[in-house]
Image (cartoon, rainbow, N blue to C red):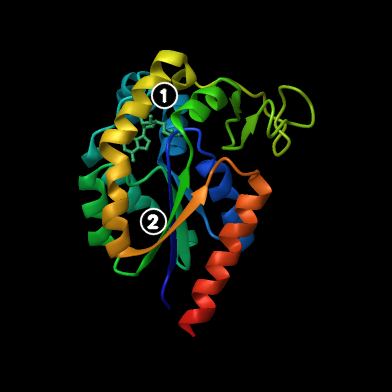
């Protein structure tokens, strides 16, 4: 059976992580977030965690070779047999090349478009949880202040959501990740979403487009 593969990309704070989780829930597919995998390693203070911590705090990119290994192992796991959703990978041309080598199926790329101005505004109000849930103090408030709705964990501000780090992440995004849209069109289908719409509207739109895509394939 052909796997269903969805790839979310967009600037930091575009809401791609939120949409990836919503889609994963709906389609019952695992969401693989490289940023989340690194944060877990950092939390557990593993060798890998120690190594990447210095890079992620400053908003830089972890070397392609390290990310490749993580991705390859993760998508080989049992829960990804029917497909998977990627959040935050690929981010560079080399990563895109590697992904195209290990995935033979056509992929669906969901590009969430948000202006730099909006990104800067949003990230200052972002709160994260260890379990991977993400909140926003205006757009997606937790039911109880400071507490995760999903797991009851204590919410925190990511180290890389500081102002100067955000500027660096945006710069890297425009230089290295944004140009990948051009390759995406050749490797599959690209959906461009307006990330400044409401979360539920974007979700509905993504589902509608996926439905249309698969019904037109039959
Ligand atoms: P994210 O949660 O996707 O914003 O990722 C947090 C941080 O993890 C990034 O700023 C990078 O330092 C690192 N990271 C995540 N995904 C990748 C990737 N595909 N390639 C290189 N570094 C990554």
Image height of 50 relative to 203, above or below: above
Which residue position is annotated with label 1? 45
**What quarter of the picture does the N terminus occupy?**
bottom left
Q: Is residue 143 left or right of residue 185?
A: right
Residue 90 appears at what percent x and percent y? 32, 47
The image quadrant of residue 122 is: top right
Question: Residue at horizontal 67%, vertical 23%?
Answer: 154
Apparent side of residue 98 relative to residue 42 in the rendered image (left or right) = left
Q: Which mark is residue 173?
A: none
For the point 59% across and 36% down, which residue is it?
A: 131
The 10 Å Cα crowd at callout 2, few under 14, some 14 to 19, many 20 or more, is: some
Vertical relation: 167 (above or below) 4: above
| Front in this rendered view, residue 118 or 131 | 118
Circles 2 and 1: CB distance less than 8 Å?
A: no
**First in residue order: circle 2 vs circle 1:** 1
From the viewer's side, name the closer residue of 67 and 6: 6
Judge whether 206 appears above or below 59 on screen.
Answer: below
Where is mark 2, residue-wise? 75
Secondary structure of residue under mark 2:
helix
Query: What residue is shown at x 72% (from left), y 26% (from top)?
Result: 147
Instruction: Return the residue found at the far bottom.
Output: 218
Left or right of 187 on screen, residue 152: right
Q: Residues within 10 Å of mark 1 (few under 14, many from 20)?
A: few
In percent of width and height, residue 145 lies at 76, 23
The residue that appears at 60% across and 58% down in the rendered structure is 205
């Amino acid at each position: 059976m052909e796997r269903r593969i969805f790839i979310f990309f967009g600037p930091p704070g575009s809401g791609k992580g939120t949409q990836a989780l919503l889609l994963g829930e709906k389609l019952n597919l695992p969401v693989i977030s490289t940023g989340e995998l690194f944060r877990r390693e950092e939390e557990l203070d593993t060798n890998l965690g120690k190594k990447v911590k210095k890079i992620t705090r400053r908003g830089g990119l972890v070397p392609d070779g390290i990310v490749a290994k993580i991705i390859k192992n993760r998508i080989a796991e049992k829960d990804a047999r029917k497909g998977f959703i990627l959040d935050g990978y690929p981010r560079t041309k080399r990563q895109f090349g590697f992904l195209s080598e290990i995935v033979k199926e056509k992929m669906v790329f969901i590009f969430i478009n948000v202006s730099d101005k909006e990104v800067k505004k949003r990230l200052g109000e972002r709160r994260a949880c260890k379990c991977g849930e993400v909140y926003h103090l205006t757009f997606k408030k937790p039911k109880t202040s400071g507490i995760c709705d999903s797991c009851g964990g204590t919410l925190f501000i990511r180290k890389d959501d500081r102002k100067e780090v955000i500027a660096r992440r945006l710069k890297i995004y425009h230089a290295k990740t944004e140009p990948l849209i051009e390759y995406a069109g050749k490797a599959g289908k690209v959906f461009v979403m307006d990330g400044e719409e409401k979360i539920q509207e974007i979700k509905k739109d993504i589902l509608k487009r996926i439905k249309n895509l698969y019904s037109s394939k039959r």
